[in-house]
Image: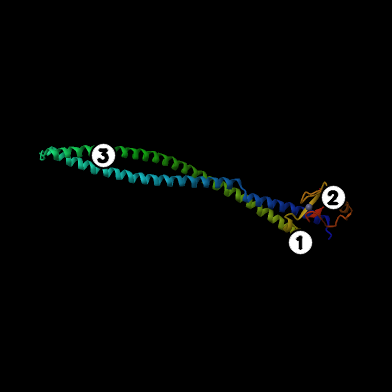
Amino acid sequence: MKAELAQQHSLLDLAGLDAELSRLAHRATHLPEQQRYQELENQQRAVADRIAVLALGLEDLDAQVAKLESEVDAVRKREDRDRGLLDSGSISDSKQLEELQHELGTLERRQASLEDSLLDVMERREELATEQAGEQAALDAVDADLASARQARDVALAEVEQARTDTTARRTELAAGVDAELFALYERQRTASGIGAGRLMGGRCGACRIELDRGELARITAAPADEVLRCGECGAILLRLTDS
Ligand SMILES: [Zn+2]
C-alpha cells in the first residue's frame, strides 16, 4: 500500500489524538476527586454505622433505667407500707414486729443496691450520649466535606468529558481527510493492539517501543517514502517522518 507523506502525517496526528483519548478515558475512571469522594462516602457510612450502634446501646440503657426505676418505686411503696404498719402501733405481737423490721431492713438494702445500679446505668448512658454527640458532629463535618467533594468531582469529570468531546470532534475531522483504505488499516491495527500507527524514531517503533533489528531497518530505509510499512513486532503502521 502507498500513502502520500501528507496522509502519513495525518495518521501520526490521528495516533496522537487516539493516545490523548486513551489518557482521557483513563483519567475519567481514575480521578483523584472521585477517590476523595469515595473515601468520604466510606467515612460517612462508618460514622453512620457507629451512630446506629450507639443509638441501640442508648435504647437498651433507657429500658434498663425504666426497669430499675419501677423496681425502686415498688420497693419504696413496700417500705412505706411496712413503716406505716410499724408506726400505727396496730401490731403488738413481738414476733410479727420482728419479722416486719427484718423485712424493712431487707427492703432498705435492696433499695440501696437498686439505686447504685441505677446510678451506674445512668453514668453509662451519659457516656454513650456524649459519644453519640461527638459522632453526630463528625457526621455533620463529613456530610459537608462530602458535598464539596461531590461538587469538585463533578467539575473534574465535566472537564474530562469536555476534553473528550473536543478531541473526538478533532479526530472525526482528521479521519475524514485520511484515505479510506489507509484509515481502515489503521483502525484494524488500533483494535488489535491498541495503537494504530507509530513513528520510527532512533531505530525504535513508536507504538511498541521495540528496537528494530539491523536487517529490518535496512529494509525500511530502502523502501520508497510513500510505501506503507508495518512494525514487525506489533504490526503498527510505521511512519518514517521528520518534523516538518
Ligand atoms: Zn511496533
Are dots 3 and 2 in contact, CB under 8 Å? no
49 or 226: which is nearer to us? Answer: 49
Q: Earlier in the sequence, mark 1 or mark 2?
A: 1
- State the CA–CA distance, disc 1 to disc 2: 28 Å
Return the residue at label 3. 110
Residue 184: mark in rendering: 1
Q: Residue at x 16, y 37 (%)?
A: 98
Answer with mark 3 or mark 1, whichever residue precedes in sequence: 3
Q: Which quarter shows the N terminus? A: bottom right
Looking at the image, can residue 208 be seen? Answer: yes
Q: Nearer the viewer, residue 76 or 23?
A: 76
3 or 2: mark nearer the eye: 3
Above or below for 184 versus 240: below
Left or right, 165 with reference to 40: right
- Find numbered disc 3 in the image and state the secondary structure of the residue it sits on: helix
The outermost residue toward the front is: 95
The residue nearer to you, when weighing 220 against 148, is 220
Q: Amino acid at mark 1?
A: Ala
Q: Do tag 1 and tag 2 residues touch (Cβ < 8 Å)?
A: no
The residue identified by callout 2 is: 213
Q: Residues within 10 Å of mark 2 (few under 14, many from 20)?
A: few
